Image (spheres, helix red, strand yellow):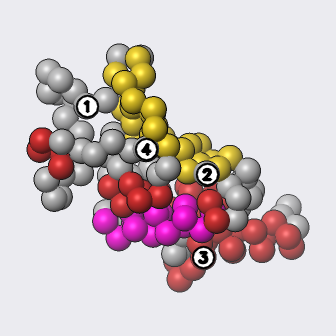
């Protein structure tokens, strides 16, 4: 049974991810991006000190990516540390203050997010090419 404080934390988290108007809807009625936001709200309801997210932008539309970026910006401002595993930084790039770039288990870079190069720097490039011979490295971002 949820206590009043629990219900309030859930309501705050749902508002944070921009789904207040859909709070009573079944998760099955939501889009993929909205479903992802529900999962993030679920994590935020516990008011964590550290939030770890693996590819939170995967399969999520631009509007949901921007809501997520705003939500994470607010959480970091409140003192939450966020650890992200990403292939593409997208709208989260301005929020990331430290990036650890890995390839084949080895650290290639540790510092400010490196600039994308080649086709990855083109506007609208927001997907991974795991089939490519030189598959992209995994970037781990830390927002503090």
Q: Which residues are magenta?
A: 62-75
Between the residue at mark 3 and the residue at mark 1, the CA separation in whole angstroms equals 35 Å
- Placement of 107 over or under 85, stated as above or below: above
Of helix, strand and loop, which one carries label 2? loop
Q: Nearer the viewer, mark 4 or mark 3?
A: 4
For marks 2 and 3 on the same chain, the one whose residue lies earlier in the sequence: 3
Q: Which residue is the site of mark 3?
A: 15
- Residue 102 position, x and y percent, is 39, 26
Of helix, strand and loop, which one carries label 4? loop
Q: Which mark is residue 136?
A: 1
Other residues around mark 4 within 10 Å, as few (<14) / some (14–19) / many (≥20) = some
Between the residue at mark 4 and the residue at mark 3, the CA separation in whole angstroms equals 31 Å
For marks 1 and 4 on the same chain, the one whose residue lies earlier in the sequence: 4
In-front residue for pair 19/112: 112
Between the residue at mark 1 and the residue at mark 4, the CA separation in whole angstroms equals 18 Å
Whether tag 1 and tag 4 are in contact, CB under 8 A, the answer is: no
Of helix, strand and loop, which one carries label 1? loop
For marks 3 and 1 on the same chain, the one whose residue lies earlier in the sequence: 3
Q: Nearer the viewer, mark 1 or mark 2?
A: 2
Q: How many marks?
A: 4
Horizontal arrangement in the rendering, residue 83 relative to residue 35 (left or right): right
Q: Residue at 41%, 59% (x, y): give it.
A: 94
Between the residue at mark 1 and the residue at mark 2, the CA separation in whole angstroms equals 25 Å
Other residues around mark 3 within 10 Å, as few (<14) / some (14–19) / many (≥20) = some
Other residues around mark 1 within 10 Å, as few (<14) / some (14–19) / many (≥20) = some
Between the residue at mark 2 and the residue at mark 3, the CA separation in whole angstroms equals 22 Å
Q: Which mark is residue 144?
A: 2
Q: Which residue is the site of mark 4?
A: 112
Q: Which mark is residue 84?
A: none
Whether tag 1 and tag 2 are in contact, CB under 8 A, the answer is: no
């Amino acid at each position: 049974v949820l206590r009043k404080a629990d219900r309030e934390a859930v309501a705050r988290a749902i508002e944070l991810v921009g789904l207040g108007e859909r709070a009573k809807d079944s998760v099955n009625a939501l889009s993929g991006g909205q479903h992802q936001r529900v999962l993030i709200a679920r994590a935020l309801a516990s008011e964590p000190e550290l939030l770890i997210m693996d590819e939170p932008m995967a399969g999520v539309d631009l509007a949901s990516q921007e809501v997520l970026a705003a939500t994470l910006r607010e959480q970091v401002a409140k003192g939450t540390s966020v650890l992200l595993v990403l292939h593409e930084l997208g709208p989260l790039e301005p929020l990331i203050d430290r990036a650890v770039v890995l390839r084949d288990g080895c650290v290639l870079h540790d510092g400010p997010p490196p600039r994308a190069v080649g086709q990855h720097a083109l506007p609208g490039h927001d997907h991974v090419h795991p089939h490519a011979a030189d598959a992209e490295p995994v970037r781990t971002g830390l927002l503090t």
